[in-house]
Amino acid sequence: MLRFFQSYFPYQYVSLLGLLLLIRLPLLLHSFPLLIPELNWMIVGEQISQGNLLYRDIWDSVSPLSALVYWGMDALFGRSLIALHGAATLVAVFQVVYFNYLINTRDIFPERTFWPGLIYMLFMHLSFDCMTLSPVLMSTCFLLLAFGTLVRQMDRRGATDEVFEVGFYIGIAALFYLPSALFIIWAVLSLLFYTGATFRQYSLSLFGFLFPFAATILFYYLFDGLDDFNRNLLAAVFRVRQYSLSDFQSLLVSLFIPLGLGVLGFVSLFNRAGRYVNFQQRVQQIMAIWFVVVVLTIGLMPFLAPMMFLSFVPPMAYFTYFYFEGIRRAWLAELTFTIAFMLILLFFYQGALGLIPGSGLGRLSSLQVQPSPLPNTIRNQRILIIGEDLSAYRYNRLATPYLNWDLSKYDLKNLDNYESVINIFDHFRKDPPDYILDRENVVEKLFQRAPALANQYEKTAITDVYKRR
């Protein structure tokens, strides 16, 4: 396979994209588990379609531009899982093509080849959850665009006002996935060490980064949602921790080969530094800084799953190229890549289809939507789930803004505060749920604090479920 993609001809893009579609087609045609984050994104899109404002009327920590995309997906396709996967495939196609195009047109490697795109495409299949339209996936598109603009600056004798674009792309990436804001550190360090940027150009880059945030803040200020924006997005990046969704074993297995090959490629550079021109060495260094910065984002992730690590793919794919380039025997490089290719795809399909009987490896069971605790007769109802398990929303709709439990605690776990009780009462009055599923045992105390709500609901035969009278 390496030999086939070693030549650089335009028709190879067709082969590369055909291989990507061939890998994904079995899963696009075969139903596989709905994931809790996917259900969460669908609910956000659905609620925005109904005229609710994110953060003010929907308490969730998804970043605003991602929510805008989910709104568009809901408007076009409703709650369609295959639409999410199809859109994610289009985004993946863009990233693979752009990464390969950029590497070759800027002569970032000594030889022009399709290996960068091939490796990038393979690493985008860390696990079956990487097939969905996640905020991290969308954010990485704009990080790549920032990388492309930064490389153009490094290829010149001095930086130009295009550094504004670098900051702007990172700002857009952060509005898709807030931890990506840390990449402004990567941009500043890269401009400082590897370009002749002036103070004015640093200021332009920083202004480009802040401009999308300023526009978003102005929007929420005009719609009386600035406090909600701050609490449910900016502060939430430090508060929202859905540890119950993490699968550490599957995560480590999915990252083992890409990280291992990337590290081997990075180490191999120390023995071959003289082979690369000054520009190529600077690109190697800014990619190393990218990797360091993306490691810092781990501490801001709401949960740990392979799809949260897609922003690791560009540096892993970049350094892996050097590992295979350094293997002198072509047959050994081919054999090594084939084994890596097969192992990564085996884990990819195992997670989605359960190819190994009795093995839960890669299945991400804690991330899957479980059967609803509500009976099948309760469908298409407006409900409120008090707790982390969102499974009952699969066939029902959200009532009140309280979607994310970590954020809902601000009111629902603060019932000794008069203002919180008033907020809850107002939300119930505007959008009363037909059913309440109380997994955190707060309803009884809420009813004591707000007797008017207690008169509207009664217990059902189902544990922790209350029905509107």
Image (cartoon, grey):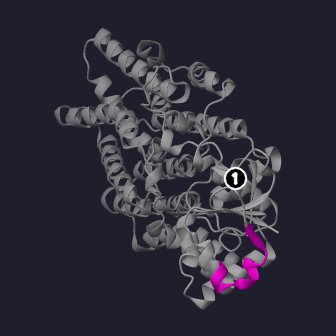
Examine the structure image and report whether residue 457 is included in the region drawn in magenta: yes
Q: Is residue 283 left or right of residue 232?
A: left
189 over 24 or under it: above or below: below
Which residue has dot 1 on it? Answer: 393
Helix, strand or loop at disc 1? helix
Q: Is residue 303 left or right of residue 196?
A: right
User: Taking the image as drawn, is residue 458 in sight?
Assistant: yes
Q: Residue at x 63, y 79 (%)?
A: 446
x and y percentages locating residue 447 in the rendered image: 66, 79
Q: Residue furthest top?
A: 331
How crowded pointer 1 is (Cα within 10 Å; few <14, some 14-19, many 20+) is rated as many
- The part of the image, by quadrant, that contains residue 192 is bottom left
* On screen, residue 433 above or below 334: below
Number of marks in the rendered image: 1
- Under mark 1, the amino acid is Tyr
The span picked out in magenta is 447-458
